[in-house]
Amino acid sequence: MLDYPPAVRKLIAALRQLPTIGPRSAERLALHILQQEESYALSIADSIREARARIKSCPVCGFYCEIDLCEICSDKKRDHRTICVVERPADVISLERSGTYHGLYHVLGGTLSPLDGIGPEQLNIPSLLRRCAGLEVSEIVLALGHDVKGETTSLYLSGELKTASLRVTRLATGLSVGGSLEYADPQTLVHALQGRKEI
Amino acid sequence: MLDYPPAVRKLIAALRQLPTIGPRSAERLALHILQQEESYALSIADSIREARARIKSCPVCGFYCEIDLCEICSDKKRDHRTICVVERPADVISLERSGTYHGLYHVLGGTLSPLDGIGPEQLNIPSLLRRCAGLEVSEIVLALGHDVKGETTSLYLSGELKTASLRVTRLATGLSVGGSLEYADPQTLVHALQGRKEI
């Protein structure tokens, strides 16, 4: 049975490694790339190379940066006394898009998962503890997921970090804006009720 | 509002150009590429470059090839008197996977669509007519889609090609194997009934 030439098969195999791309999608993407102008394919290939070569982790917070320090850590106008702890770099962007947080960040690179061999040393937790040891920091906002791993990690961090001079807070749990009671799960409703506020 | 560094934004924009990849998927794919080992990103970038540089259209049939002539056209064991006309290179692979066709192919590169300015000259139709002008070819199998454009193109081609010595056939219309009557559309049922066979 005839198949695509080797270079096409290799491209399909490479694209299949991407998340959410199955065999059919990989084939469709590969053929699309082959059908377009050469400059189109090269622009995609170059963007991948360039991003991978240029983007580093900020040595302070772990967010993406192209130079020595990321845009956030090097911004003098931000509140350097508050650090928001997130799981992944994408979470930084989500919070930035909300437009209400003006402190710094710390990207853990995951959540604690002892069964998978992921302890504090495998995440950016030691560097977080060092950052908090400075007198400058006054509040840590834990913005991890409200799932089991996120909860465990939040609990661990609050135990390690809480001191007389350091406030540790976490994001509120409740209904989504625009969300109806009908679609909220019981646990979320428990939290929404317990956290109710005067209006 | 802070956004990803320029190289990441450029990568997201490049991936968004791919079919079926929306803004969220592009972001997820880009971040996945950045999180993996450098060799992973480079292997994807290189496969794209390599495929685009190596893969050419076979000058005879229009299927993909890496050398002068595609694997099918250069295969002496195949039946060189039958040519199956398809729309896209992927259709060649679909037919090859069925394992029943052993002739040659001709990839049109699309279907006739006068409203979009796609006439015979914009497709590989002139080269098909030249191929058929040789005495060697005895049957043309039209394997275009059974939609309006495919039908129009099939009709046009059969008008151009049919001669006393050249048979022009087309793929049968009917139920899918494993398909139930419940999900077959009325038009397909009409064809399935008209094309019924003794068992």
Image (cartoon, coloured by chain):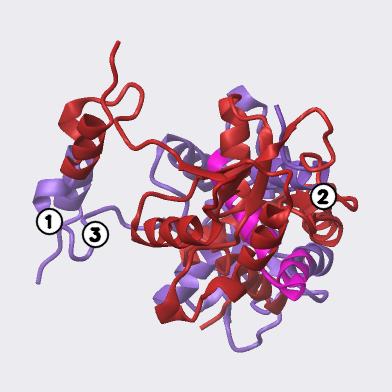
Chain colours: A purple, B red
Disc 3 to disc 1: CB gap under 8 Å: no
- Name the main secondary structure of what is drawn in magenta: helix
Q: Would you name the residue on which mark 2 appears?
A: B43
Q: In which quadrant of the rendered view does residue B7 lie?
A: bottom right
Decide if residue A36 is in sight here: yes
B163 vs B181, nearest the viewer: B163
Residue B149 vertical placement versus A101 (above, below):
above
Amino acid identity at mark 2: Ser
Q: In which quadrant of the rendered view does residue B99 lie?
A: top right
Classify residue B30 as left or right of residue A158: right
Q: Chain of mark 2?
A: B
A185 vs A112, nearest the viewer: A185
Give the Cα separation between the discs numbered 3 and 2. Answer: 41 Å
- Asked if the magenta segment contains residue A38, the reply would be yes
Write the start and end of the magenta stretch as one range: A24-45
Q: Would you name the residue on which mark 3 appears?
A: A176
Give the Cα separation between the discs numbered 1 and 2. Answer: 46 Å
Classify residue B53 as left or right of residue A44: right
The residue shown at (67%, 35%) is: B103
Residue lying at the far bottom in this picture: please name it. Answer: A77
